[in-house]
Image (spheres, rainbow, N blue to C red):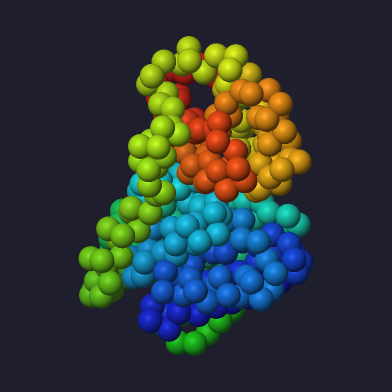
């Protein structure tokens, strides 16, 4: 396995790059905008294809690299379902997994630092975001934080993991890089409490100044969605509101880009074919399944996904591959359902 812990000294953020092998698919957790050049270079050097960029929560102390990485690599952006970010490709919740080739992260909902805070468990290690830090815990005094929820997330979820589970947080200000669940239970000063009330008391009396980047970072991190209006102005966009009837037109082929779990969870548009987004280049290039289907049938391909991000990027990939009779469903399945479109 490839496992890299990368550091941004400006915000003391740890970013994690994961892959099961050289030359394979990669996933990145909590990337920082200022470091995107470095990540892209490292991906290149290790011959990795970035598939997913994940934030543990909406950060207040740095601008996320999610949007820039998506623009540079056409990767899938992932956050929790409570996230206020305008658009991400996939929104996950407790019990989901985040998968790439050879790796799977279990999604744990661990609110408290913010109401959109998640931890991700991968075999012997857990990425705890700002929920559990090394010898500390993330502040709970803004972004719908709650010391009550954080106590539950830490004591009833994270500390229930095996003692030797490695803890990799999103930040450290002292230079510590990794800990374990057992070590934090024993030595984290904030966890040496006898009750939830005692923990809440500690957290409510921290009296911390706001992060210096907060007024810049939060608004920026709320607006990371891919601009879909360019495709609309190019006539490469269909709207769910325009009538669902249009989509059963036999001159269209609906292509679902979501993965199998999303399809099982949220349903599919009847009559659509499945082509998971990570393989899109293979499918739209000459000789690929969608390339040949579009060419031989003369039908127009309509890509759709959860919110319209992957489908917009798929349109770009298809245009690059020389296909022109294509478009996407703006706003994806989310907009489709909101407009009352049928699902199967
Ligand atoms: Fe945070």
- Number of numbered markers: 0
| Percent position of residue 201, x then y | 31, 66
Q: Residue at x 47, y 31 (%)?
A: 329
View extreme (bottom): residue: 175
Q: Which corner quadrant of the image does residue 141 belong to?
A: bottom left
Q: Is residue 260 left or right of residue 266?
A: right
Q: Residue at x 51, y 52 (%)?
A: 78
In the image, residue 45 sits, relative to residue 196, either above or below, namely below
Q: Residue at x 53, y 41 (%)?
A: 315
Identify the image quadrant of the N terminus. bottom right
| Percent position of residue 229, x then y | 35, 41
Q: Is residue 7 left or right of residue 273?
A: left
Question: Which of the two residues, 147 or 84, is positioned nearer the viewer here?
Answer: 84
| Percent position of residue 90, x then y | 52, 45
| Percent position of residue 71, x then y | 47, 57
Q: Residue at x 76, y 41 (%)?
A: 287
Q: Is residue 199 visible?
A: no
Q: Which corner quadrant of the image does residue 218 belong to?
A: bottom left
Identify the image quadrant of the C terminus. top right
Question: Which of the two residues, 329 or 25, is positioned nearer the viewer here?
Answer: 329
Q: Is residue 316 visible?
A: yes
Q: Which corner quadrant of the image does residue 265 belong to?
A: top right
């Amino acid at each position: 396995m490839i496992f890299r812990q990368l550091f941004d000294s400006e915000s003391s953020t740890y970013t994690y790059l994961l892959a099961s092998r050289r030359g394979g698919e990669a996933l990145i957790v909590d990337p920082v905008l200022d470091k995107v050049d470095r990540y892209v270079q490292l991906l290149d050097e290790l011959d990795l294809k970035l598939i997913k960029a994940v934030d543990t929560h909406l950060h207040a102390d740095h601008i996320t690299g999610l949007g820039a990485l998506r623009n540079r690599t056409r990767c899938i952006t992932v956050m929790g379902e409570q996230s206020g970010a305008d658009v991400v490709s996939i929104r996950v919740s407790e019990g989901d997994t985040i998968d790439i080739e050879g790796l799977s992260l279990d999604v744990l909902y661990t609110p408290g630092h913010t109401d959109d805070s998640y931890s991700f468990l991968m075999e012997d290690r857990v990425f705890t975001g700002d929920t559990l830090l090394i010898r500390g815990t993330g502040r709970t005094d803004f972004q719908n934080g709650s010391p009550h929820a954080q106590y539950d997330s830490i004591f009833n979820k994270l500390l229930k993991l095996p003692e030797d589970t490695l803890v990799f947080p999103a930040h450290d200000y002292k230079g510590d890089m990794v800990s374990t669940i057992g070590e934090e239970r024993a030595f984290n000063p904030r966890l040496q409490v006898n009750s939830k009330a005692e923990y809440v008391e500690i957290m409510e009396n921290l009296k911390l100044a706001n992060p210096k980047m907060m007024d810049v970072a939060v608004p920026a991190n709320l607006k990371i969605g891919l601009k879909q209006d360019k495709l609309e102005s190019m006539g490469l966009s269909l709207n769910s509101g325009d009538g669902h009837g249009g989509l059963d037109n036999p001159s269209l082929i609906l292509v679902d880009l979501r993965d199998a779990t999303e399809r099982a969870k949220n349903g599919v548009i009847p009559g659509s074919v499945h082509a998971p987004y990570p393989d899109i280049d293979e499918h739209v290039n000459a000789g690929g399944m969608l390339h040949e289907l579009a060419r031989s049938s003369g039908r127009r391909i309509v890509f759709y996904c959860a919110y319209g991000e992957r489908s917009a990027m798929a349109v770009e990939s298809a245009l690059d591959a020389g296909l022109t009779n294509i478009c996407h469903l703006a706003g994806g399945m989310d907009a489709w359902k909101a407009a009352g479109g049928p699902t199967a």
